[in-house]
Image (tube, rainbow, N blue to C red):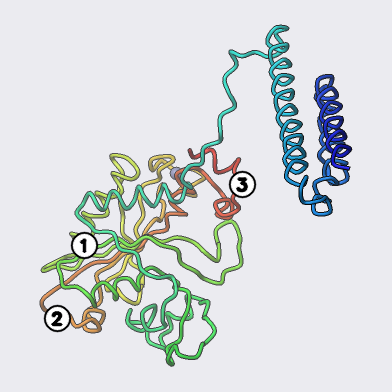
Amino acid sequence: MSGKVLDELEKIRKQALADIERASERDFDDIRVKYLGRKSRLTEILKTLKDIPSEIKPKVGKTANDVRKDIENSLNKRSSIITGNSMAAKIETGSEDITKPGRTARLGSKHVITQTIEEIVEIFVGLGYRMVETGEVETDYYNFTALNTPEDHPARTLQATFYLEERAGCGDERTLLRTQTSPAQIRVMENSKPPLYVIVPGKVYRPDVPDPTHSPMFHQVEGFAVDKEITFGDLKGTLEAFCEKMFGAGRKVRFRPHFFPFTEPSAEVDVSCIVCGGKGCRVCSHTGWLEILGAGIIDPNVFEVVGYDPEEVSGFAFGMAPDRIAMLKYGITDIRMFFENDVRFLEQFK
Ligand SMILES: [Zn+2]
């Protein structure tokens, strides 16, 4: 019996090696199945080893495994020879140009909004500001009340808000997705003493219907300064310096009176059109100006909330939308394009 099995194994080995020797590339799979597959004779022998008398089991087992290894090795060897030959043949006939550059992997890059935010932050860091990031989930208190916008304040109706479902253990404080980066003012002031020069980039949320100028998620960069004797003149100088660095030398800046709950006086800030330089064009609606910022002198009520003495310190705050700035800078007419993640669009800004 043992002799028969050993003879059979030798026959399998001889037959397999002969088949492999003649094989072309497309035969490999068939050979593998025929000799090594689940239904092959070799596999069957290996599976029934346990029924073989114990005195010859080791010899049959070893031979069967050797045959298996031999077949695998010669399959691999033959395969690499054939592949090598076919590459050599292609090079020989010139159908494979080995001087051709290799296929390069596509490199990712920073999103155009990230680039714009970094550019803004870098300018303020250069002016001595420190960057701070705070959470996107805020409480009603930090997003509104502490910013001089109590429950019944009409300004609340100006900002539709995503409120979060109340969960047990969160206290009775209502939570929401921040509608502005301004809560960072309160959080920073609560935990540190002036002088403060802080810049806060981040995502904000408002339940607006998406259209070319609205997205339910967009970005803001907030900045504020608190120190002794800070005046509106300091705010103006700071924003002029920023605009010149961000949009190029010779930019003019103008302030128009406006209302924000946590600054008084407040202003909307325009920069001379970055496309036409102020002569008037389609982008600036032929006014020569682009609105890019909101700003103002921090309301004394805000200082009282955080325990600062409004007689001792004063400050200014400003906020801008990097999405809008990037749209103006690159002539993009639909804010939604930033967030659709179409690589063909995003690759333009590498
Ligand atoms: Zn213009």
Relative image position of residue 217 (x, y in whole percent): 52, 64
Residue visible at 43% across and 83% down in the picture? 154
Residue 52 horizontal/vertical position (percent): 83, 50
Residue type marked 2? Asp
Measuring from the top left, give residue 8's x and y in whole percent.
Answer: 87, 35
Identify residue type, mark 3: Asp
Q: CA distance from mark 3 to mark 2?
A: 50 Å
Label 1, residues with CA under 10 Å away: few <14, some 14-19, many ≥20: many
Give the residue drawn at x 38%, y 68%. Answer: 181
Q: Count numbered badges in the picture.
A: 3
> Which disc, if any, is residue 309?
2
Q: Relative to 129, is 59 on the left or the right?
A: right
Amino acid type at circle 1 is Tyr
4 left or right, relative to 64:
right
Question: In the rendering, which numbered label is found on residue 197?
Answer: 1
Indicate the secondary structure of the residue bearing disc 3: loop
User: Which comes before the other along the chain, label 1 or label 3?
Assistant: 1
The residue nearer to you, when weighing 278 against 109, is 109
Q: Compute the Cα span from label 2 to label 1.
A: 18 Å
Ligand 1 quarter of the rendering: top left
